[in-house]
Image (tube, grey):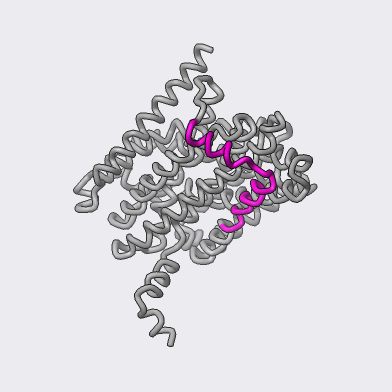
Amino acid sequence: MLKRIKKLPFVRNIFFFLMILGPGIITGSVDNDAGGITTYSVAGAKYGYHLLWSLIPAFIVLVVIQEMNARMGIVTGKGLADLIRENAGVKLTFFIFFGLLIADIGNTTTEFAGIAGSAYVFGVDKYISVPIAGIAVWLLVVKGTYKFVEKIFLLFSVFLLSYVISAIMGKPNWGEIGTAIIAPKIEMNFFYISMVIGIVGTTIAPWMQFYMQASVIEKGLRIEDYKYTLIDVVFGCAITVIVAFFIMVACGATLFKNGIHINEAKDAAMALEPLAGELAKYVFAFGLFVASIFSACILPVASSFYICEAFGFEAGIDKRYKEAPQFYTLFTGILIISMGIILIPDAPLIKIMLSSQILNGILLPVVLICMILLVNNKDIMGEYVNKPFNNIISWTTIIVMIALSLILLGLTLFT
């Protein structure tokens, strides 16, 4: 009976989609990490609804870029780091990935800051929450198989929708939201420009490109699976932007309206209690905790993947420690360094959080240039090279991000 049902076209398509489901949604969901939630929270508290417009171009660019990643991984069977090394040489690869590694250590530190902050809302000290979370993350990745870990990650993705509840509890003015999106107020000052770069940098993070391509390969997807993979990618991108939208709405409807300024996502959760009730505080903090644990797993894995790929070492969650010692050593090292920074008394966590997001935005053009050159190379991609639309969107993104970075540098030097 089950075989007959699977033969029905509609049911068969759903069945295949569910089998392929994972890389796009996981990559998109983990993008709403502690650093991202902090960036969106600060943006909502500082500017209300006036930065929501930035999520629309971010969504379009995110879909185009993630589709390129998935297509490149399916066609070549190689990770992005591997392709960059083969075509750009070891020296250039070293400098690119050294910068990315520094950024990713900062990003992973941010995740443990998110764990510490959210646990604090529930009355748990960071010296308890951070080590326990670190051990749990290490055991999940080192001892788990790819299929098992993927199921856990998909479950985490669902929990991120708790931010929709937080936003609704804030009773936002949907008319004001519509006006802010259609007719945004754009400012030319350091903080506004840095927030735009931070939003784009956290919505379209450099590490995502490497993790997406690596996960497509590890899942064993083929060109026949492409149309289902594309749906997975669009779903993941939609989740990224929807969650970001509701975080900004939640903070805009409550904190901005009451003139409350915050420095991190934990502050947003605590400030919500007198404005939207105790439940809103705990829902927001729960979302932060889930997102932080989720991303604390993915980010060190992604970093270890692309560093090992770039220099020809074995990598993969399905491999044992003896088969991929460099991969697991690097993963463990990133976890220990990040946890150590968080446990330092009076560590400048806010600066680490926001700086890592801005660094993501500055590094993004470098990664995108490498990607576009590779995906347009017929020797690598054959008939599956980019279409003109993809190239227009990609090159426009690069030009805009470089321009914003130069503006930010100018404002820093001359103001």
In front of the other: 170 or 216: 170
Does the magenta segment cover residue 167? yes
The range drawn in magenta is: 158-183
Residue lying farthest front?
175
- In the picture shown, does residue 109 fall above or below 358? below
Q: Residue at x 20, y 53 (%)?
A: 383
Residue 403 lies in quadrant: top left
In front of the other: 163 or 19: 163
Quadrant into which the N terminus falls: bottom left
Does the magenta segment cover residue 135? no
The answer to whether residue 18 is visible is yes
- In the picture shown, does residue 208 fall above or below 4? above
Q: Residue at x 33, y 39 (%)?
A: 393
Residue 384 position within the rendered picture, expressed as x and y whole percent measured from the top left: 24, 52
Magenta part, dominant SS: helix
Quadrant into which the C terminus falls: top right
In front of the other: 177 or 200: 177
- In the picture shown, does residue 305 fall above or below 147? above
Residue 250 position within the rendered picture, expressed as x and y whole percent measured from the top left: 64, 42
- In the picture shown, does residue 51 fall above or below 151? above
